[in-house]
Image: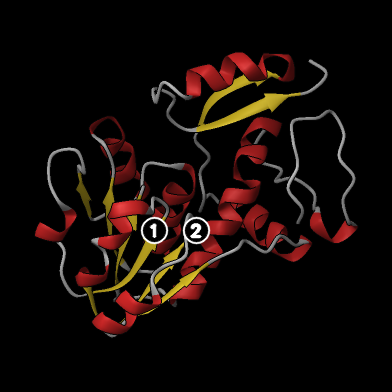
Amino acid sequence: MAGGAYAEFIATDADNVARKPKSVGDAEAASLALVAQTALQMLDRAGVKQGQTVLIHGAGGAVGGVAVQVAHLRGAKVIGTASGPSQARVKEYGADEVIDYKTEKFEDRVKNVDAVLDTVGGEVQQRTYGVLKEGGTLVAVTQPPSAEEAAKYKVNASMLVTQVSTGSLETVARMIDAGEIKPFVGMVRPLSDVAEAWREIQTGHVDGKVVFTVGQ
């Protein structure tokens, strides 16, 4: 999938699109199309399954929120990091524990996890290697993990680039219609308000996915 910009029309390959889920509106479907594929592919890359423990950085965010829901569905013990206002929602998604990253360090509470899904990067990623058990897996989407740190802690670490496909989108749609994945839309604005919306986003006070509507 190629990158793009805000526009009324886009040209893409037929195998990059699918029919939207029947149970949600256009804004909700748009909010999940890419992030849900990313979350599912992170969980698959990490091999998260029943009985394992997974730490999800940014559990209150778009990708992290879906990852919490699906990891819980798979029977894993889910630990999420999220700020105060998002904690209740992350618990509703199925997290067994939620750590407020503004008031405590996750490494003080988390040890020997099977997998970490990192949607944050930076110094958070640097502090993550030590909470994985030997042979555990770190999957990141914001920056490539350090091969040196991974070797030092004897863990597996990789950067995921989301692969968009009709089949993947159809899987997401089925899960949405089955009630297994729930959207969280924080803001819906017309395309003409992109600049204003971005100024609001940059304040850090917009929670949930931002969706722009076209022709309304």
**Mark 1 sits on what residue?**
118
For label 2, the SS is loop
**Residue type at the position of mark 2:** Val
Q: Nearer the viewer, residue 74 or 194?
A: 194
| Quarter of the rendering containing residue 167 | bottom right
Q: In this view, does 132 lie above or below 211?
A: below
Residue at the far left: name it.
108
Which corner quadrant holds the C terminus?
top right
The residue drawn where x is 56% and y is 22% is 198
Q: Is residue 117 above or below residue 136?
A: above
The residue drawn where x is 19% and y is 48% is 99
On the image, the x and y values in percent for residue 87 come to: 26, 38
Q: Is residue 107 above or below residue 83?
A: below
Q: Residues within 10 Å of mark 2 (few under 14, many from 20)?
A: many
For label 1, the SS is strand
Instruction: Decide if residue 109 is in sight here.
Output: no
**Mark 2 sits on what residue?**
141
Q: In this view, does 148 lie above or below 21?
A: below
Answer whether labels 2 and 1 touch (C-beta < 8 Å): yes
Residue at the far front: name it.
148
The residue drawn where x is 33% and y is 68% is 76
Which corner quadrant holds the N terminus?
bottom right
On the image, the x and y values in percent for residue 78 come to: 29, 60
On the image, the x and y values in percent for residue 79 come to: 26, 57
